[in-house]
Image (cartoon, helix red, strand yellow):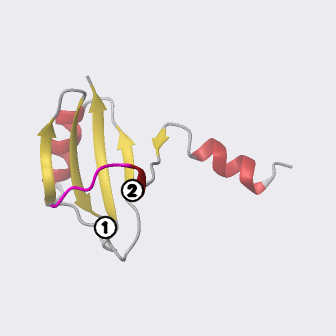
Amino acid sequence: MTAPNQTLERQLTGVLIFDAFAIESNPDWPVSPDGMSVTFEVDDFHAAVGHLREHDVAFFLGPTETKVCHWAAFRDPDGNRLVIHKRK
C-alpha cells in the first residue's frame, strides 16, 4: 500500500509550486485572500491557449511572453487562480 503523501508527491510531479512571499510583488497580481495559484507547464503553449479560449476561459493576465517563458493566468469555475506556462 502506498502512503498518502507518496501518492500526492507522484501526482504533483511536474507541477511548479512556489512561495508568493519569496518573489517580487506584481501590482497586477496582488496577494489574494483566496490563496495561492497553481502553475501547469504545457507542451504546446499556443495550442493550450487556443483550447482554453474555445471553452470560453477568460485570461485575467496574459498571454504574456517573458525572457524565459510564455504564460497566461485564468480562474477555474470555483475562482481559483491557475496559470499555464511553457519555458523557452
Q: Is residue 25 magenta?
A: yes
Say whether disc 1 or disc 2 marks the residue closer to the N-terminus.
2
Q: Is residue 62 above or below residue 47?
A: below
Q: Secondary structure at mark 1?
A: loop
With respect to residue 34, does 56 lie above or below?
above
* Residue 54, x across and y down, in percent: 14, 52
Indicate left or right for 56 with 77 as reference.
left
Residue farthest to the top? 88
* Residue at position x 30%, y 72% in the image: 79
Instruction: Please state the horizontal and vertical placement of residue 17, each as a whole percent of the image.
Output: 47, 48
Q: Tell me residue 37's x, y (percent).
A: 37, 59
The picture places residue 36, in percent across and down from the top left corner, at 40, 63
Residue beneath disc 2: 20
Q: How many marks?
A: 2
Amino acid type, residue under disc 1 in the picture: Val
Q: Are marks 1 and 2 in contact (CB under 8 Å)?
A: yes
Marks 1 and 2 sit apart, C-alpha to C-alpha, by 8 Å
Crowding around mark 1 (Cα neighbors within 10 Å: few <14, some 14 to 19, many 20+) is few
**Badge number at residue 71:** none
At x 41%, y 50%, the residue is 22
The amino acid pointed to by label 2 is Ala
Q: What main secondary structure does the magenta stretch of the protein show?
A: loop
Q: Which mark is residue 31?
A: 1
Q: Which residues are magenta?
A: 23-27
SS category of the residue bearing label 2: helix
* Residue toward you, 43 or 70: 70
Residue at x 59%, y 46% (from the top left corner): 11
